[in-house]
Every structure is written in C-alpha cells, then in structure tokens.
Image (spheres, rainbow, N blue to C red):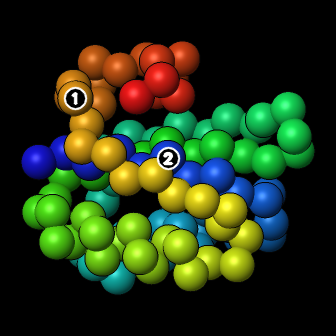
C-alpha cells in the first residue's frame, strides 16, 4: 500500500537528512518527494512510500518527535505517486 506523508516544518539545518534517516532506519525508500516553501517561512514536504500500515504508523510517530517538525499528516495515497503532479500533492 502507498502512504502519503505531508510534513509541515521549520526550515532547519539538516531537516531533510533527519527525515530521510527515519525512513532509512526502517529500510524504506520514498518513491517520491516534493519540497515547497510556504508563505509563513515554513516548508511543506510531501513524501510517498510503499509499506504496511503498522510500519507507516511507526514512521509517523518517529517523524513527530523531530524538533523542527510542526505537524505530520499520514494518508493512504489515492493514486500512484507518478500520477500526482506537485501542484496536486497539496490537495490530497
């Protein structure tokens, strides 16, 4: 199953590296990633990853513990990542 993470964060040093490390620790490779700066000096990162539900929820919990992360939404992806354009990713 493909899961979509929408991460809202403060743009800190090595933010993307710390997020990638969480996925790497669980032996997961994101299928697609979108990085977008928001009007409020924050970033929105949208990641798609294929895995089982229990693993998706474990990664979600670990992401919430990062200090620059303001919020993480976890959704079941409704389409394959390659079929979703970056402008559509924020409306999932």
Q: Which residue is drawn at 21% across and 25% down?
A: 79
Q: Which mark is residue 78?
A: 1
Looking at marks 1 and 2 on the same chain, the residue that comes earlier in the sequence is marked by 2
**Is residue 47 in view?**
yes
Q: Which residue is drawn at 78% across and 35% down?
A: 38
Left or right: where 82 falls relative to 23 = left
Q: Which residue is drawn at 54% across and 17% down?
A: 87
89, above or below 42, in the image: above
Q: Name the residue under label 2.
A: 6
Q: Distance between the residues labelled 1 and 2?
A: 14 Å
> In the rendered picture of this protein, how many numbered marks are placed on residues?
2
Q: What element carries label 1?
A: loop
Q: In the figure, residue 41 lies in which quadrant?
A: top right
Q: Where is residue 82 in the image (x, y as percent from the top left)?
A: 29, 25
Question: Dot 2, crowdedness within 10 Å: few (<14), some or many (≥20)?
Answer: many
Q: In the figure, residue 67 lies in which quadrant?
A: bottom right
Q: Position of residue 9 (x, y in %)?
A: 70, 57
Question: Dot 1, crowdedness within 10 Å: few (<14), some or many (≥20)?
Answer: few
Q: Where is residue 77 in the image (x, y as percent from the top left)?
A: 25, 37
């Amino acid at each position: 199953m493909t899961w979509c993470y929408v991460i809202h964060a403060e743009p800190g040093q090595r933010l993307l590296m710390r997020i990638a490390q969480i996925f790497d620790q669980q032996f997961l490779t994101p299928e697609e990633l979108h990085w977008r700066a928001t009007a409020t000096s924050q970033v929105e990162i949208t990641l798609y990853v294929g895995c089982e539900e229990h693993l998706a929820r474990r990664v979600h919990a670990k992401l919430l513990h990062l200090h620059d992360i303001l919020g993480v939404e976890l959704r079941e992806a409704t389409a394959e990542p390659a079929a979703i354009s970056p402008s559509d990713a924020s409306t999932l």
